[in-house]
Image: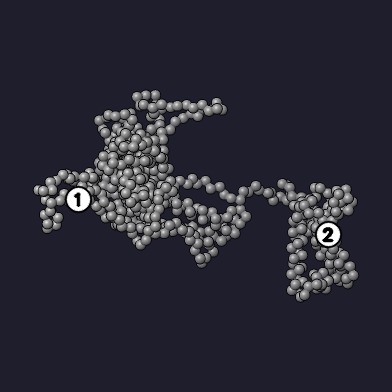
């Protein structure tokens, strides 16, 4: 645009810079006006149309072309430029006319309709901005566990396990009767006429704190590409949070540490393998191996695989039967590996049920993951979780490997030759009460196991089990059908407690634990039997930008403290 025209249009400007800025503002206003016109937001109403509409003539805000015939902002602005151009030199008028023609052409282009057919493939898409996050999130253990502040690198605590006449901690009872005139007892080097001195049992534990962290990054290209569609940095932060919390939940359930104070690696199992007919396994010489699993997940933590049979000759249409001869403490299940030359993963075997400690493979799948050659059953940077603590008889108040068909009638009625197998839950309640007078509140198990209990009750062949289902009819004449076992009456409870049955989504198959949250000892100085001690609670970290990415991490430092595992118990092999 000629400088003389800019000077005339913006004659009140104080400098050339301000005139240029105003011209750019005008161009921006033109573009916005075109957009508002195309959207049908604004329009121009001539006097005759305005008179009929009962409004003032001129530019109408919010009155689109569907209401009246209108030319829009661009016409009005072009008209103004035409008025200003009068009286200019011939050269300047030619330049202004050229620019007006360009503006009118732009107006005509914008005025064209966009349809599905025109112009070609410029079709509008119904694109929703946020992606749908289809990730269930269950963290019941970490949500309910109490938390307290820690400091340093480890938590050390002392426990009084028993004293005379408590019947606990292996301390013998003594009689408080004595004769003050004749009875003497030793107090150091002195022999005095006093009652007998009581004894104590205690221990000391040092639990090191462990760190947790996960990280994510968003590239600049991804961030700028998704502007207006998805806030990918927010998505990254949300995914980081839940990835961390879900990892903590699984660690609380089955984590297994190897640092001093934790359980350490699981011992390797022992097994034998034999073959027979009746299956579909092709004829060949197979290697059969087994590894003990100590935790869950897509890549279970497990011992190095041990060979059950290194040269098992199978005839055509054969089977392979594997028998566990040693089941190490802490094993939650067993990974089975079979192959020609190299044993590969076939599945997870949970001992128990009618098969006891054997599993029979009737088919063979090639191409799986090779048998592990190293031990990953524990982690030097991990802490111990519930199942790790409560499936160890040295820690738990009661542990039992269930090796009978589950469920069966004897779970609900007394009797049976195999007390451990016939009524596992009631037997565990009784054992916990006998050892420490425990009165547990909860049993955690996998969904299939609770469903099996309900299916057993609904079975017509098990009418000897005492139960009834009450059907209530609502005012709307609707009936809710179905039943679910929500608790078990503890036959050994001094308070007549009904123990809640709770399903954990990540519970390994066949595993369960009975949990006493609160001890029946008012002055125990233990609010909850398990407590999370945190030097640093959950925190998020946004890292400095040193490359074309937005980087973030989480951080946590602490450990769960199992003050009273003797008041809880574990179980494996529920089938």
Q: Position of residue 501 (x, y in %)?
A: 39, 38
Q: Secondary structure at mark 1?
A: loop
Distance between the alpha carbons at the discs numbered 2 and 1: 103 Å
Q: Nearer the viewer, residue 160 or 563?
A: 160
Q: Nearer the viewer, residue 214 or 370?
A: 214
Q: Position of residue 273 (x, y in %)?
A: 27, 40
Residue under label 1, please give it.
199
Quarter-of-image position of residue 96: bottom right
**Left or right: residue 520 compared with residue 177:** right
The residue that appears at 13% across and 51% down in the rendered structure is 193
Quarter-of-image position of residue 465: top left
Quadrant containing the C terminus in the rendered view? top left
Q: Secondary structure at mark 2?
A: helix
The residue that appears at 86% across and 67% down in the rendered structure is 84
Residue under label 2, please give it.
76
Scheme by which the image is coloured: one colour
Q: Nearer the viewer, residue 448 or 425?
A: 425
The answer to whether residue 472 is above or below residue 163 is above
Q: Which circle's residue, 2 or 1, is located before the other in the chain?
A: 2
The answer to whether residue 46 is above or below residue 19 is above
């Amino acid at each position: 645009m000629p400088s003389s025209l800019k000077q005339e249009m913006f004659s009140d400007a104080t400098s050339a810079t301000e005139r240029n800025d105003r011209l750019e503002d005008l161009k921006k206003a033109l573009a916005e006006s075109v957009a508002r016109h195309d959207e049908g937001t604004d329009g121009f109403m001539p006097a005759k149309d305005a008179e009929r509409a009962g409004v003032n003539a001129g530019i109408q805000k919010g009155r689109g072309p569907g209401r009246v015939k209108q030319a829009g902002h661009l016409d009005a602005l072009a008209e103004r430029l035409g008025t200003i151009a009068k009286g200019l030199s011939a050269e300047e008028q030619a330049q202004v006319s050229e620019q007006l023609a360009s503006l009118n052409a732009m107006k005509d282009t914008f005025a064209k309709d966009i349809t599905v057919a025109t112009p070609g493939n410029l079709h509008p898409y119904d694109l929703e901005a946020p992606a749908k996050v289809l990730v269930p999130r269950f963290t019941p253990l970490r949500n309910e566990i109490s938390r307290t502040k820690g400091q340093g690198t480890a938590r050390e605590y002392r426990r009084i396990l028993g004293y005379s006449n408590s019947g606990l901690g292996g301390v013998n009872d003594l009689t408080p009767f004595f004769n003050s005139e004749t009875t003497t007892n030793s107090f150091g080097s002195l022999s005095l006429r006093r009652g007998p001195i009581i004894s104590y049992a205690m221990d000391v534990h040092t639990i090191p704190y462990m760190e947790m962290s996960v990280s994510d990054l968003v590239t600049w290209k991804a961030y700028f590409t998704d502007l207006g569609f998805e806030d990918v940095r927010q998505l990254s932060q949300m995914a980081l949070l839940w990835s961390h919390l879900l990892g903590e939940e699984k660690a609380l359930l089955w984590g297994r540490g190897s640092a001093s104070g934790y359980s350490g690696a699981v011992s390797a199992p022992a097994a034998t393998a034999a073959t027979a007919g009746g299956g579909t396994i092709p004829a060949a010489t197979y290697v059969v191996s087994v590894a003990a699993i100590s935790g869950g997940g897509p890549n279970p933590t497990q011992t190095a695989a041990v060979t059950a049979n290194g040269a098992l000759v199978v005839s055509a249409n054969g089977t392979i039967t594997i028998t566990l001869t040693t089941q190490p403490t802490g094993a939650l299940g067993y990974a089975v590996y079979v192959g020609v030359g190299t044993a590969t993963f076939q599945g997870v075997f949970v001992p128990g049920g009618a098969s006891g400690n054997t599993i029979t493979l009737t088919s063979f799948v090639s191409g799986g993951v090779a048998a592990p050659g190293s031990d990953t059953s524990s982690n030097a940077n991990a802490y111990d979780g519930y199942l790790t603590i409560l499936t160890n008889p040295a820690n738990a108040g009661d542990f039992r490997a269930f090796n009978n068909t589950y469920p069966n009638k004897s779970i609900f009625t007394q009797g049976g030759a195999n007390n451990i197998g016939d009524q596992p839950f009631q037997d565990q309640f009784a054992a916990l009460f006998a050892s420490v007078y425990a009165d547990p509140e909860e049993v955690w198990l996998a969904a299939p196991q609770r469903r099996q209990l309900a299916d057993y009750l609904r079975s017509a062949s098990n009418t000897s089990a005492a139960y009834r289902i009450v059907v209530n009819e609502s005012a709307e004449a609707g009936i809710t059908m179905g039943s679910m076992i929500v608790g078990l009456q503890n036959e050994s409870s001094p308070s007549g407690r009904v123990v809640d049955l709770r399903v954990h989504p990540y519970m390994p198959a066949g595993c369960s634990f009975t949990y006493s949250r609160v001890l029946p000892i008012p002055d125990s100085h233990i609010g909850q039997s398990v407590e999370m001690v945190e030097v640093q609670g959950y925190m998020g970290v946004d890292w400095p930008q040193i490359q074309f990415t937005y980087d973030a991490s989480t951080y946590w430092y602490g450990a769960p403290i199992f003050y009273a595992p003797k008041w809880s118990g574990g179980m494996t092999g529920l089938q």
